[in-house]
Image (cartoon, rainbow, N blue to C red):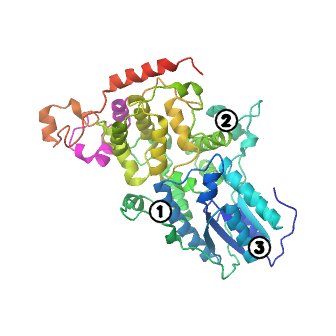
Amino acid sequence: MARNLLVTRVQPVIVWFRDDLRLSDHPALQEAASRGAPVIGLYVRDEQSRALKPPAARPLGGATRWWLAHSLRALGKSFEAIGGTLVLRTGPAASVIATLARETNAGAVFWNDIAQAPHQAIAGDVESALASDGVVSKIFPGDLLVDPQAIRNKDNRGLRVFTPFWRRVQGLGDPPKPLPAPKKLTSVSGIASEALDEWKLEPTQPDWAGGLRESWTPGEAGAQARLKAFLDDGIEGYANDRDRPDHDGTSRLSPHLRFGEISPRQLWHAARFVAAEHPRLAGDIDKFLSELGWREFCRHLLFDVPDLAKRNLQEQFDDFPWKRDARALKAWQRGLTGYPIVDAGMRELWHSGVMHNRVRMVVASFLVKHLLIDWRAGEQWFWDTLVDADAGSNPANWQWVAGSGADAAPYFRVFNPILQGEKFDPDGGYVRRWVPELAQLPDDLIHQPWTATPIELASADVELGKTYPRPIVDHKQGRERALAAYAKIRGKG
């Protein structure tokens, strides 16, 4: 992709940042810094190209816009600390970057690849615009462990089943070791930059982001601190504890990974180092890396299926009799379904911008199976409310639950929200935190308050239908209705 032109030492190099908001293990930045020329960091808010390039890149949801604002602020401070400057501009990326290159007499523009069709289409326009001006462009791998083209089947297609996919990835050996952050940059003064606050990425009226501020520290430093804390104190028991929403058993690295504040190979090598130092943790490390592998699997799937968020991978689901039920959808979104584990998850999502992975499966199953609402409605809600909303993982996971995707759970696997709550939140700690109106119920009733006697409800200050809703659908009836709907499409496609 790079043209064979030399960059003189006096000509600056522009480094275009996208979903890689970090200084360490940033191949494009490392190469630019190694040239000895001045380095210009650039982030482009390009909403025009995103919309025009088919398939269009999705506009960020509210929660990810909030995260982006804080991550860019942190990146700007990191640049300043080593003598550089991060420039912010708005407009079509090809036009903005070519203009900045002319303004600064830049000799080259470097960036890290994002193996997604819309991003690659925009990058292609940037490359063409630079080439017409005689400016070098060079693209580096930096978003994945393995290039999607490296793992194909005999028909030159990506793999659709996770286990053989992950086996192939592991068979390729360790990815390259992470690169250090540059210690010092030479900047270019006098470059016009937009003010981050003018982009209005954060909510103001109303300001619903209080829970996000309380829960997260966006930025590369926050990502590194979170990784260290997890590997120091959280990895032991991860294989089992990650399924317990009432425990602090997950890594909480997903939004940092989503915005590239930390890279997949940084996680890989840090985890492998801990496994070598502490062999007893090998099983937990392997499970953690397999979760990183699932993210990789979803990204590879998205590479082959750019419209993953719009169409069923299994075409038989095109005929599925989904219901349009705005009232039920709203109750699900607000955490008012009458099923405590579901409502706890939806309220955790609204407050913190994330939801425990086990609970994500439960609430997704409830929407598409108990309520028969199209998985795309749930995927869109998650896209807007998750701080880790990922273009690959979000739709792939929803299709997995719905039964319409790759390596999907069978549709007839309908999660019982009562049993799921009792198994993974046995003491009710998770429900009590997020559904405080049920906090006084005993453990054996907290996941099914409608079975409590009037005296038990009164003693816990619970009045069904007033302080807490009754179930909007009976579990048994919902399950039977879901199976009947599935029977209508069985054998099609």
The disc, 2 or 3, on the residue closer to the chain's N-terminal end is 3
- For residue 217: magenta? no
Question: Based on the displayed image, in which of its 4 quarters is residue 180 positioned?
Answer: bottom right
Q: Residue at x 82, y 76 (%)?
A: 9
Quick one: label 2, few (<14), some, or many (20+) residues within 10 Å? many
Please determine whether, in this image, residue 103 is positioned above or below residue 330: below
- For residue 437: magenta? yes
The disc, 3 or 1, on the residue closer to the chain's N-terminal end is 3
**Residue under pointer 1:** 217
Q: Amino acid at mark 3?
A: Ala
Q: Residue at x 22, y 38 (%)?
A: 442
Q: Amino acid at mark 2?
A: Phe
**Residue under pointer 2:** 165
Closer to the eye: label 3 or 1: 3
Rounded to the nearest angstrom, the CA distance separating label 3 from label 1 is 34 Å
Q: Residue at x 23, y 46 (%)?
A: 437
- Depth check: give the residue in front, 287 or 192: 192
Rounded to the nearest angstrom, the CA distance separating label 1 from label 2 is 33 Å
Label 1: element kind: loop
Where does the magenta region start and end? 416-444
Label 3: element kind: loop
**Residue under pointer 3:** 106
- The N terminus is located in which quarter? bottom right
